[in-house]
Image (cartoon, rainbow, N blue to C red):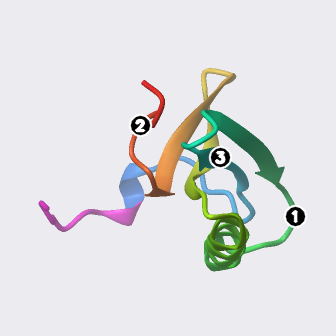
Amino acid sequence: MNVREVSPLDTTWEQDHARYRVYFWDVAAMASDEYEVLGEVDVEEVLAWASRYAAERGWSYTVYALALDNGRPGLIRLAGVLGDPFA
């Protein structure tokens, strides 16, 4: 891990409420369920829900923040499985 000091002036926008995507992976069945989480929720709430939901089913999960790049949606991984477990 690399850590460096930054200036808060190097960004041009900030958003208080993110949109999250949560992918649940059922590796045994080679299946997945995907959800979008909206509203005034913090990432801690999303992570807690994803962890409980996955544990109840015996699945793994990945939590992403949905971001826009020149108007195109993309995903930024926040926690969970790295990459597509079916690849």
Residue 2 horizontal/vertical position (percent): 12, 60
Residue pushed farthest right?
39
Q: Residues within 10 Å of mark 1 (few under 14, many from 20)?
A: few
Q: Between 54 and 17, which is closer to the camera in this rendering?
A: 54
Residue at the spot 73% in from the left edge and 69% down from the top edge: 53
Q: Is residue 85 above or below residue 60?
A: above
Looking at the rendering, in which quadrant would you find the C terminus?
Answer: top left
C-alpha span from label 1 to label 3: 18 Å
Query: Answer yes or no: do the residues labelled 1 and 3 have beta carbons within 8 Å?
Result: no
Question: Looking at the magenta stretch, what is its main secondary structure?
Answer: loop
Residue at the spot 30% in from the left edge and 63% down from the top edge: 7
Q: Which residue is mark 3?
A: 23
Q: Quadrant of residue 31?
A: top right
The segment highlighted magenta reads: 1-8
Q: Between 85 and 68, which is closer to the camera in this rendering?
A: 85
Residue pushed farthest front?
28
